Amino acid sequence: MEQTWQSETTVSDGTAVVTLFGELDIAAASPLGDVLQGAIALASRVQVDLARVSFIDSTVLSAFVNAHGRATDMGVSLALVKPTGHVRRVLAMTGILPLLAEPDSDG
């Protein structure tokens, strides 16, 4: 099965930005968890840029929540930034958007 998503991680000034692209479903959940874990190990702040993500499902939501828990345990802040369309609706409906929004943003 063809991979429907990609990720790119950059680190600058203590912040790791994980930019995700495409559609994230059950096949993406485990590798996404690994990507997020790697970013958490690199920096004290992690931003997951969702601007170019067109679809997420519940397994991906779980990966985000698990990563947030691991980050918190390690004293790292992890936030989902720039969700749009379907992704923003799913995050808002499930109550995850306020949990994982940046503290100084309006979600």
Image (tube, rainbow, N blue to C red):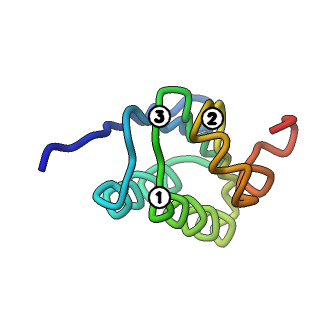
Separation of marks 3 and 2 at Cα, in angstroms: 8 Å
52 left or right of 103 in image: left
Seen in the picture, residue 44 relative to 71 is either above or below; the reply is above
Foreground residue among 58 and 11: 58
35 left or right of 72 in image: left
Displayed quadrant of residue 73: bottom right
Read off the residue under disc 2.
Answer: 83
Q: Residue at x 65, y 30 (%)?
A: 82
Q: Residues within 10 Å of mark 1 (few under 14, many from 20)?
A: many
Instruction: Tell me the element at label 3.
Output: strand
Read off the residue under disc 1.
Answer: 60
Instruction: Tell me the element at label 1.
Output: helix
Q: Are marks 3 and 2 in contact (CB under 8 Å)?
A: yes
Which numbered circle lies on residue 53? 3
Q: Residues within 10 Å of mark 2 (few under 14, many from 20)?
A: many
Q: Identity of the amino acid at label 2?
A: Pro
Label 2 vs 1, first from the N-terminus: 1
Q: Residue at x 44, y 36 (%)?
A: 20
- Residue 102 % position (x, y): 77, 43
Foreground residue among 6 and 74: 6
Displayed quadrant of residue 37: bottom left
Separation of marks 2 and 1 at Cα, in angstroms: 14 Å
Q: Are marks 2 and 1 in contact (CB under 8 Å)?
A: no
Q: Identity of the amino acid at label 1?
A: Val
Q: Identity of the amino acid at label 3?
A: Val
Displayed quadrant of residue 16: top right
- Residue 69 % position (x, y): 63, 70
Separation of marks 3 and 1 at Cα, in angstroms: 12 Å
Q: Residue at x 41, y 60 (%)?
A: 33
